[in-house]
Image (cartoon, rainbow, N blue to C red):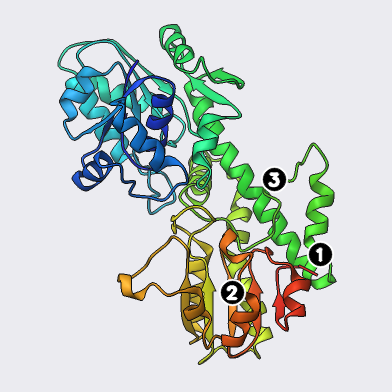
Amino acid sequence: MNILIIGTGYVGTTTGLIFCEMGHKVTGLDLDDQKIQALKTGKLHFFEPGLEELLTKHIQTHQLTFTKDTETAIKENDQIFICVGTPQGSDGSADLTFVKNVAKSIGQHINKYKVIVTKSTVPVGTAELVTNVIQENQTAPIPFDVVSNPEFLREGSALQDALNPDRIVIGTTSETARTIMRELYKDFHCPIVETHPKASEMIKYAANSFLALKISYINELARVCDNLAINVKDVSNGIGLDHRINPHFLKAGMGYGGSCFPKDVNALIQTAKELGNPLSILEAVVQVNAEQPVYFIEKIKQALGNDLKNKTIAVLGLSFKANTDDIRESPSLVLIDKLLEEQATIKTHDPVVKMGAPHQFPTIEETAAGADALVICTDWDDYKNLDWAGLKSLMNQPYIMDGRNMLDKEKVERLGFRYLGIANY
C-alpha cells in the first residue's frame, strides 16, 4: 500500500517506520522544513531507542520518503494517517487546530477514494468532525472514509510496542474501510478490536486515564506506608501478583508526566464536565499527581534541616521517564521549580536531555561536586551502577534522595550515604 503519514513527530515517525517494516511504501509529510531535512538525512529530532537505525534502513531502501508538498502527497497516496499534535488547551481540553487544518487540506486535494485514519489522540466525536471538515472543503463530492485507529506507544519502548502490539483498535462504520484496515494489519498477531469510531476514541483516553489512576493510587498509598514505616515495594508486589490487578504501573515515585497522561486525563475530565458527568476519581488522580513532587520535597527539607537556602541540590534526570528526551510535564521540572522557591542552588544531569549551550553539559562527577544531596528524578539505567563511593567523596553532604526507589538502599548506606526514598524501608 501507499501510505501517507501527516505529522513526523514521535507517533508519525514510529508509525511510518513500522509500516515500512511491513513492506508498505510510506511518505512522511510535515510543514516543518527543519524536521524534514533532518529526517531525509536519517536524523531523528527526538530520542527513541532503535528508531534512528530503522530510519536509515528505510531511507536507503527507498521505502520511506519525506516531503513538504501537501497537494502531491495527498493525491498520490491511498491511506492517509493523521499524526499531528493535539496539545492541551487552556481549559484542559484537546486543541484540534492541527487536526482541522489537515482535514481541510485533505478536502481541498482529495482526488479519489481514500481511507483517512486518525492516529492522533483525539476527543470522542473527532472522526465525525474530520469527516465534516473534509466534506466542507471538497470541490467535488469524492467518497472517502474516516477511521479511528489510536496508538498505544510507550515513550522509550515505542519500537517494540509498535512491532508487538497487545491490541489494535479500528473504529469505523464502513465495511470498505474495515476491509482495508484488516489488510493493512494482517501481519500483526494480536487481538483486533473493531468498533464504532466513538468507542475507539474513548478506548484511548480510558486506557491512559486508568494507567494514570494506578500510578496516583500507589503514590498516595506510599504516603501512608511512609507514616507506618512500611516498604511500599512489598505492598506493590503483594497486590500486583493478583491477576486482576497485575504489577504494571504500581511503582511508587514522583508521579506521571510526559506528553500523554497529563494531557489525556485532563481532556477526558473536560469532556465529562461538558456532558454533565464529572469524573471525580480522575480529578483526584490529577490532584494526587500534582502533590507528589511537593510531598517529596518536604521529605528532602526534613532530611536537610528544613532550610534549603544555599543548599546545593544535584538533580539526576530531567526526562519524565528513562529512554526518552521528553521533558513535557516532567516531575523533575516541578521539583526544580519548588527547590528554587526554597532558594536552593540547583545542578542538573541527564544522559540524553541537554539544556543550554554544549559547554554547559556537565558530567555526573561535575554535577555531584559540592552537592548537599543527590536527587534521582528519572530511573535511567546509567544511575544504577555509578561509582557511588567516588561520588560521595565529591559531595558536601552524603545524601541520596531516590525519587524513583531505584537504588539498593542497603548497598549505598554501606558506603556511608544517608538514603531517603519513597516509603522504601
Q: Are marks 2 and 3 in contact (CB under 8 Å)?
A: no
Q: Are marks 2 and 1 in contact (CB under 8 Å)?
A: no
Determine the residue positioned at 53% across, 47% down. Answer: 265
At numbered mark 1, what does the secondary structure look like: helix, strand or loop?
loop
Where 116 falls versus 140 (above or below)?
below
Task: Indicate which disc residue 140 carries.
Answer: none
- What's under tag 2, amino acid-wise? Val
In the image, 292: left or right of 112? right
In the image, 41: left or right of 10? left
Q: Earlier in the sequence, mark 2 or mark 3?
A: 3
Please count the marks in the image. Answer: 3
Q: Do the residues labelled 1 and 3 touch (CB within 8 Å)?
A: no
For disc 3, the marked residue is 248
Dividing the picture into quarters, in which one does residue 248 lie?
Answer: top right
For disc 2, the marked residue is 375
- What's under tag 1, amino acid-wise? Asn
Q: Where is residue 60 in the image (x, y as percent from the top left)?
A: 30, 31
At numbered mark 3, what does the secondary structure look like: helix, strand or loop?
loop
Task: Indicate which disc residue 231 carries.
Answer: 1
Could you give the CA–CA distance between mark 2 and mark 1, rounded to whole angstroms? 19 Å
- What's under tag 3, amino acid-wise? His
Asked whether residue 137 appears in the rendered view, the answer is no
Q: Earlier in the sequence, mark 2 or mark 1?
A: 1
Determine the residue positioned at 34% across, 30% down. Answer: 58
Dividing the picture into quarters, in which one does residue 181 lie?
Answer: top left
- Neighbours of disc 2 within 10 Å: few (<14), some (14-19), many (20+): many
Q: Position of residue 255 (x, y in %)?
A: 60, 59
Determine the residue positioned at 49% across, 21% down. Answer: 171
Q: Position of residue 240 (x, y in %)?
A: 79, 46
Q: Which of marks 1 and 3 is nearer the N terminus?
A: 1
Determine the residue positioned at 80% across, 72% down. Answer: 227
